[in-house]
Amino acid sequence: MTTTLHPPLNSDSTLPPAAEALEQLLQRFIELSHKLNLGLPTVEYDKNWLSECIIDEQPDEKGLVKWQPKIRRAEGVFSQMEDALGVKFHPDVIAFYTHFWSDGIVASHSNGEISLIQIWNSEDEDMLKQNLLGHAFAKQKNRLPLTLFIGCTYNDDIIAIDNNSGHVVLERPGFAPHETIANSISEFLNQLTPTLKPYNG
């Protein structure tokens, strides 16, 4: 038995390609959990780190609770950041971060395993914004092309979206991107195979 994400994101509007690709990836993740673990994914329960994603706040004997991605409707999430930076974020960045509440996931890519960031709760969102803002200000200070990170590789490369082109790139902290790995976030997400390895972002 598999669990689909409800309500469907495109029930009342056309999904941006980035959000649609993310939904499909998260669905593959849920289906993998049902196939291998016969149920929803689990996460260690923390009473100070709750989320709408948690299905039941009563932890099991191992201190774990079941969860699944939760659809959200969010507008203007990055408006203040855009004003502070004097730029508009690429639509793919906004689509990637504002359509779901979810834990991050670990996935396989042709470049190796990667960790993909998602937003677990409002506090997590605030921390992400602070980190993105610091990243973006550093780019501006060093006169480097603006990128906005979405994850990392296990070789400590940052996975980011080029804010101008929408390409998904690899870069090292403090440097310009050194490799383009996909022409868009939707193309990149479609290349990923989810795993059930714990996310430690």
Image (cartoon, rainbow, N blue to C red):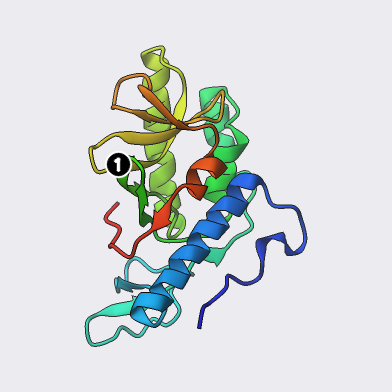
- Please say whether residue 71 is visible from this viewpoint: yes
In what element is the residue under mark 1? strand
Q: Name the amino acid type tagged 1.
A: Thr
* Residue 1 image position (x, y, % from top left): 50, 83
User: Residue 163 at x, y = what percent?
Assistant: 53, 27
* Residue 88 against residue 28 in the figure, above or below: above
Give how far across and how far down residue 159 sits, in percent.
38, 36
The residue shown at (54%, 46%) is 96
| Disc 1 residue crowd, few under 14, some 14–19, many 20+, Cα 10 Å | some
Percent across and percent down for residue 73 are 64, 57
The residue lying at 40 percent from left, 77 percent from top is: 35
Apparent side of residue 93 relative to residue 143 in the rendered image (left or right) = right
- State the residue in front, 10 or 129: 10
Residue lying farthest to the right in this orientation: 12
- Which of the 4 image quarters holds residue 37? bottom left
Residue, disc 1: 153
- Inspect this view and state whether residue 78 appears: no
**Is residue 133 shown left or right of residue 190?**
left
Quick check: 138 above or below 26? Answer: above
Front-lying residue, 105 or 111: 111
